[in-house]
Every structure is written in C-alpha cells, then in structure tokens.
Amino acid sequence: MLFSSPFFIFHFLPLFLALYFLVGPAYRAYVLFIGSLIFYFWGEPAFCLLALVSALGDYGLCQKIYSAGTSSKKAQFYLALGVGANLGVLFYFKYTHFFLTALSQVLFSGKYTFSWVNILLPIGVSFIVFEKITYLVDVYRGKGEPARSVVDYLNYVFLFPKLLAGPIIKYHEIEKQLSQQSPQRLQVILGLKRFLLGLSKKIFIADACGAIVNPIFALPASDLSFAAAWLGIVCFTIQIYFDFSGYSDMALGLARMLGFELRENFNFPYISRHFTEFWRRWHISLSTWIREYLYIPLGGNRASMPRVYFNLWLCFLLSGLWHGANWTFVLWGAYNGLFLVCDKLFWIKLSSRLPQIVCTALTLLGVMLGWVIFRAGSLEQIQYYFLALCQPTRVTPVYFDFTADLFAAASLGAVLILLPLVPGYARCMTVYQQWQGRQRSEDVFLTVLGFLALCKVVSSAYSPFLYFKF
C-alpha cells in the first residue's frame, strides 16, 4: 500500500485516524497494531504471517537475553540465535537466487541454471530485519530493556509509517512514545503539513524526473548519446533524492500525526564537501546503523589503520549488497567504500584548504557517477553508460518528450537541493523564521500545494517509491 496511492490517502488513512482518535488512550496501541498489520498484509499477505511469527520469536528471545545477563554465554547464544534467524530470513528471500546464480557461474560456467528458484522479495524486508536485530543487540549491550508488552514491541516492528522504507529506529528511542500515545492537536497539524510536503516532492519533482530517467536508461548502447547520458544521470540524482526524502517526509509526518517523533533521515546531502559528510546527511538512519552495528563491532577506529580502512570499505560493500541482490549494488557499495577510505587517507584534510564550492562540486560529481552504478540494470549497462558520459562527440538521433513541465520540475529540484550554498541563505532563513506571518503563509502554501498534489494522485498512474524494492 503506497502512501501516495488514492486508496491509502482517501480510504485507509481517514478510517484509521478516525478509529485511532475516537478510542481511548488505553486502546490506541491495539488500534495501531491492527491498522499496521492490515497495512502490511495488504501489500505482503504471504510474508505477513512469517514476519509476525518472527517478531514474536524475537520478543521471547530478548526476554531470555535480558534474564541471562549481558555477559553470560546464554545471552550470547540467544543473541546469536536471534540474529542468525533474522539474517537467515533476509538471505532466503533476498539473496537465494543471487547466490545460486553466482554458484552456477563458478561451478557450471552458467550453463546450468536453478530455474526452480522463484522467490518473491517481500517489501521492506531489509528494514524490518535491521530493526529486529537492533532490538536484540541493544538489549544485549544493556542500552535498553525488553519491551514492557508484546503489543508495544509489535508496534515497534510494524509501525506502518516507517515499516516499508524506514527510517530505521531503535526501540529505546520510541519506548515511551509507544506506551503514551496521546497526540496533540499541534502534532497532528504539523504532521499533516509534513506529509503534504513529502507527497508534493514525490509527485511534482521525483515522478517528473523519473519520466525523463526511465526512457534514457532503457536505451540500448547504440542509441545513448553524450547529452542523453548526462541528462539521465542529472535527473536521476534529483529523482532519487526527492523520491526517498519525500517518502521520509511522509513517514515522519504520519508518525507525528500519531504522536511519534522519529529521527530525521536527510539533511541536504548534495552540499557535502566529501563522501564522509555525504553519508552523514544521506539516509542518516542507515549510516548510523552501519556505524553502530557493523563498523564498531569490526573494530571501528580502534584497530590498526590498514584494518580501519578495510573495515570501512567492507561495511559499505555490504551496504551495497543490502540495497539489492545484484552485482551492480555490490560494485556501488565498493565504490562508496573506496571514496570513504580516500577521505580518511587525504581528502578530508585536503578539502579543508579548498573552497567549499570546489569540494562540493567534486563530491557531487563523484556521487552522480556512483548513481550510474546504482541505477544501471547490469554491469554491461554500467560500462556503456560510462562510455557515453566520456564521449562528447557521441550524437544519436533519439528524441525525448522533454516538455516544459518536466524541465521546470527538474530545474526546481536542482535549485532546491543546492539552496544552502546560495550566499546569504542562512541569514534569509533566520529572518524568515522570525517573520510573524510565516506560519500563516506556510499553511496557505502547503494547503494549495497539497490540494494540487492530491489532484495529481487521482489522475496519475501508479508510481512506486524507489526504495520500496530494498
């Protein structure tokens, strides 16, 4: 069920909110759980029961970890059992076909294929598994206690605003919110405004850029020109940001309407001076998870410098694999890991001596080239796409329906992602924040923008969020 679908906006959400606010505070947790379960069952009926059983298993294991004590071998055993079971679910659904295909290439040179393997990837399985592992590890480390009730824990796992594509949160971050669901009128209003903002970003900018990107990346090598290749990757850079940050805005807005404050997931990532800063600003909850639950356990910065560089590269190699069971994502992870190692080796120190505009331009170019790897469907496409990017004389008679509205959307997106770099931006924002008419002007603007976005939702075709497939 998509946040931007007419069924969710005009049927599911109004009915759910009506029930949520009509019942007393003591029953809201149950309404939230039933509503979240229906929300997930609507899109993944086959996986929903397994996810529920797995969550109940984690709840029981966590009680045993807490009772055994964090330093005991029993606790370690229960933790290993829980983490192993969750990773097993993730591997089976997401990587079985990828692993068997690679095995076929090694053993049979690709002549024999495992055609009997046909496993559908459940939506949001990666996010669900990561949060369930987070819960187990945090209790083992003593950073939090087990959920006070099974309903609180199930609401943590299945909370529908963040269920399908994050942000990834920790149980102890919202433990009190789960047990005290009493949203105020101001929270509902602010949440609605944030939801409409995210919907507008998705509908008016991300989907418009997608209408340019998809035909370009569908071109065969012989038809991909230099101009088309650069247009495609510039528009995809805009599309993926506004698609994912738009989803995050909608998720945070929905959560706030229900009385939950979730962590921010984006902070103008394209103005970063280096890749390290980029990953502190892009998909913040995932970057934080990688650092706390993968990089630090591997030794973090405490190991020897060669080991630190290897750990950093390995973490992002695995991050790429987390994004998808495809060699393109593995390569994308290795690509980002390489630049993060370069940051530690020399670039962060060097970039501090250079003008910000130079550092940002070089970093943005590196990120954009990385998006080619991310968006491409195969290693072969990566190769011919990069060749097209490097051949200014490459001209092919292929024309696109690059209409004025698509150009306007892409241009607006390009301006918005780089807006903080404009001289005087911080001062203007300070003045704007102090303006007495700010609240009213925002209300009017978002009301009009939201109305237009809702009209577009009704008349537009199906357009899933990009990160739903991860």
Image (cartoon, rainbow, N blue to C red):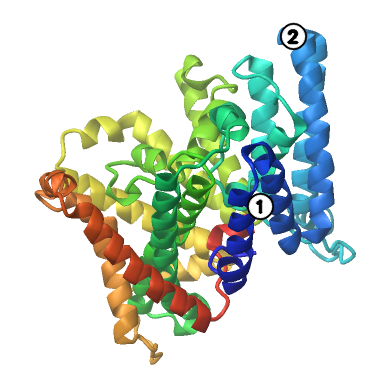
Give the mark nearest the N terminus, 2 or 1.
2
Residue 30 rendering spot, x and y as whole percentages: 72, 43
Q: Name the residue: 83% across, 66% down.
A: 111
The residue indicated by pointer 2 is: 69
Residue 157 rendering spot, x and y as whole percentages: 68, 40
The mark found on residue 373 in the picture is none
- On screen, residue 261 above or below 230: above
Callout 1 secondary element? loop
Q: Is label 2 in contact with label 1 (beta carbons under 8 Å)? A: no
Residue type, numbered disc 2: Gly
Residue type, numbered disc 1: Gly
The residue indicated by pointer 1 is: 124
Q: Name the residue: 52% across, 47% down.
A: 255
Drawn side of residue 251 relative to residue 79, left or right: left
- On screen, residue 229 above or below 95: below
Category of crowding for the residue at label 2, using alpha-carbon neighbours closer than 10 angstroms: few (below 14), some (14–19), many (at least 20): some
Residue 266 rendering spot, x and y as whole percentages: 40, 46
Residue 258 rendering spot, x and y as whole percentages: 54, 46
Q: Which of the 4 image quarters holds residue 395?
A: bottom left
Q: Which of the 4 image quarters holds residue 292?
A: top right
Drawn side of residue 18 relative to residue 87, left or right: left
Label 2 – label 1 distance at C-alpha: 32 Å
Whether residue 389 is visible to the viewer of this picture, yes or no, is no
The mark tally for this picture is: 2
Of residues 350 and 452, the one drawn nearer to the viewer in this rendering: 452
